[in-house]
Amino acid sequence: MKTAVVSTFAVITTLSAPSTSAETLRLLTWGGYAPEEVIKLFEAETGHNVEVTTSNNEEIIAKLRATNGGGFDLAQPSQDRIASAQEEFGIYKPIDMTKVDADLFIPSMLAATAENTTYDGKVYGLPQIWGTSGLVVNTVEAGDVTDYTDLCDASVAGKVSYRLKRPTLIGFAYSMGLDPFAAYDDPEAYQAILDQVETRLTDCKPNVKTYWDGGDEIKNLLRSGEVVASMAWDTGGWQLNADNPDITFVAPEAGALGWIDTFALPARGRADDAAYDWINFVMKPEIASIITNSAGNFTAAVSGDKAVSPDLKTRYQASFDDEAIDNIKWYPPVPAGLEAMEGATLDRINAAK
């Protein structure tokens, strides 16, 4: 079933006629994904208005779950957060590919996202922005930190930070020689992995300066020197590197964790035409480059890197050689119920003395 869906998804390129009436697009997205410059260009071209709410994966699902898929017209969860959320909560509606210009998307990423966001034979997501999380390190102060578990080394005691979120659980598991993604379909085996990681992260607590919540927080901690090694996104490391060449993103030895943020339609959205117009507009190469320069991550747009800052390209290449790219651990879809297990583990780590 999925093979047929992906094949159909990848070849349909029909673009719908422009919307006949202006709508207000309520966009639930990440910071940097809807720059003011792009909004103004879109509004001028289409006549639609755009209202932006910035969020993250957990909040996107929580907001849509609370409204049964209402309140927004276009959301941008990561591709591994769609199929299971749809199965549990029914908060999305399928993508209508007759309204999407598929030629704007890198075919392999379009097909991969289709496969990972398929539920009950229907596709619920389109790829937009991709990137990785790993280590952001002051290489002068913490040059020996090359993997996730190195954050627990005595040499960086009291100067470490990471989030109490699932990427930390996944990253530490890989660094400990475990394979959490391989255990996704076996709750008992996955819980056994979580238990081992819980012990390691609990023991690591004395090393942690603070558990960061927002990107600005961790960047400020690294700038000030209060933190010299952290888990964070690649774009944050590259932004810091622009100001301080000692700080940069490091792809961990166990593998950076790769993600793709998508376009998904909330089940009770009321401005579908505006949503599809936005999708087709922001995937144009010239617009995709503006978004990459704003967000710091590259897009799934064909030729979307043509106008990207040369400095950003250079920093990306310094962090990722071919081996590091091949070692990226791409997030698969999260099975239903797994996040509840992870949440309980994170709560216990947070509460531990």
Image (spheres, rainbow, N blue to C red):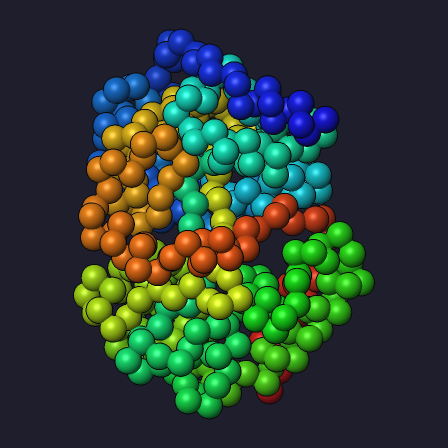
Q: Is residue 277 above or below residue 195?
A: above
Q: Position of residue 269 (x, y in %)?
A: 52, 28
Q: Residue at x 59, y 19 (%)?
A: 8
Q: Is residue 145 above or below residue 51?
A: below
Residue 32 visible from this viewpoint: no
Q: Residue at x 47, y 29 (%)?
A: 107
Q: Residue furthest front?
A: 322
Q: Position of residue 105 (x, y in %)?
A: 42, 29
- In the rendered image, the quadrant that contains the C terminus is bottom right
Q: Which sits in the foreground, 262 or 313?
A: 313
Q: Position of residue 186 (x, y in %)?
A: 78, 56
Residue 322 visible from this viewpoint: yes
When asked about the image quadrant of residue 267, the answer is top right
Q: Image check: 296 left or right of 272?
A: left
Q: Position of residue 12 (x, y in %)?
A: 52, 16
Q: Is residue 158 above or below residue 67?
A: below
Q: Residue at x 61, y 48 (%)?
A: 332
When asked about the image quadrant of residue 183, the answer is bottom right
Q: Image check: 286 left or right of 9?
A: left
Q: Which sits in the foreground, 174 or 17?
A: 174
Q: Residue furthest bottom?
A: 154
Q: Which sits in the foreground, 40 or 116?
A: 116
- In the rendered image, the quadrant that contains the N terminus is top right
Q: Residue at x 25, y 36 (%)?
A: 306
